[in-house]
Amino acid sequence: MRERLRLAVPNKGRLVEPTLALLHDAGLVFEEHDRSLVARVQNFDLDILFVRTNDVIEFVGDGVADLGVTGIDLLSETGSGLPIVRELRYGRCRLAAAVPTDSPIATVEALAGHRVATAHPNTTRRYFAERGIAVDVIPISGAVEVAPRLGLAEAIVDLVSTGSTLQMNGLRPIGDVLASQAILIANPDAQVERAIDLGAIDTMLSAVLAARGRKYLMMNAPVTKLDELSGLLPGLESPSVIPLTHQGMIAIHAVVDADAVWSLLPRLKAAGASGILVLPIEKIVA
Ligand code: AMP
């Protein structure tokens, strides 16, 4: 058995930057060397393999890598059935069916008998087959959004995040085929044989993911206001309460959703909190 674990990550494209940010935030120390094939992690028995996005799944499937970062859409397209260890909450997009804005077709059911161009033919075929809708799937590898204009197809199935590319190309979404985001996948043998090592990596990543989107709040308040303030602070667990030397005063610490902070602050102040601090959290290990 290889001594060092191997993690395959994309070397180009949309998943590169958020993947590297996640690995660095997890505390893994490595140099990218212009993303040459292998980066040796200095503080963990792990090598990071930078490979083409489409090759990540093959590397993990073959056992050349033990873990990999890819997208749900790519895993779905290969149909390889490799286990998903964790959703990584970035690279969010959807595979959507779309038609030209002036098309009379308004639903995916109404695509029956029509041609659908896509770079995701396997996922698309499966989606329509599962719903008993007979479409002619036309596999193409790029510039999918121009297929209707070229007369290649009446509809497309393509990756969408904001929908602005569809709009720019005079297309209107009519249904979602698949919701995607970046995922951590594992080789099934490595999952058994190296369960502890893989678990350690997963814990590192999940600690960062759990901390993202949370803030640590600290505030002072009169002890008489504790119940009211606690009611406003549904956090990880009940808030910590620390007595202050100033008679009748306490400090309250709590973990809250980052999205809730701005609406929470005025309510905390109104309920008697003062000296409120909002701090970032680096990691949360549940
Ligand atoms: P790309 O770098 O464009 O080859 O895309 C690589 C992967 O990033 C895709 O397979 C998706 O999982 C994801 N992705 C693609 N398009 C988007 C998008 N518009 N927004 C977010 N993630 C995307």
Image (tube, rainbow, N blue to C red):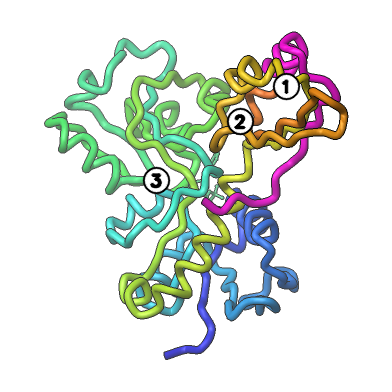
The part of the image, by quadrant, that contains residue 137 is: top left
Q: Amino acid at mark 3?
A: Ala
Look at mark 2 in the image and give the residue it sits on. 257
Q: Is residue 214 left or right of residue 180?
A: right
Based on the picture, tell me whether residue 279 belongs to the magenta stretch.
yes
Q: Quadrant of the N terminus?
A: bottom left
Bounds of the magenta segment: 263-286
Residue at point 77% right, 38% down?
Answer: 279
Name the N-terminal-most of marks 3 and 2: 3
| Secondary element at tag 3 | loop
Name the N-terminal-most of marks 1 and 3: 3
Residue nearest the viewer, comparing 250 with 100: 250
| Secondary element at tag 1 | helix
Q: Is residue 95 left or right of residue 200?
A: left
Look at mark 1 in the image and give the residue it sits on. 223
**Above or below, comparing residue 10 to residue 6 in the picture:** above
Circles 3 and 2, Cβ within 8 Å, touching? The answer is no
Residue nearest the viewer, comparing 279 with 173: 279
Look at mark 3 in the image and give the residue it sits on. 119
Q: Amino acid at mark 1?
A: Val
**Closer to the eye: label 1 or 2:** 1
**Above or below, comparing residue 75 to residue 271 in the picture:** below
Crowding near pointer 2: few (<14 within 10 Å), some, many (20+)?
Answer: some
Residue at point 37% right, 40% down?
Answer: 118
Name the N-terminal-most of marks 1 and 2: 1
**Above or below, comparing residue 123 to residue 264 in the picture:** below
Based on the picture, tell me whether residue 161 belongs to the magenta stretch.
no
Q: Amino acid at mark 2?
A: Asp
**Closer to the eye: label 3 or 2:** 2
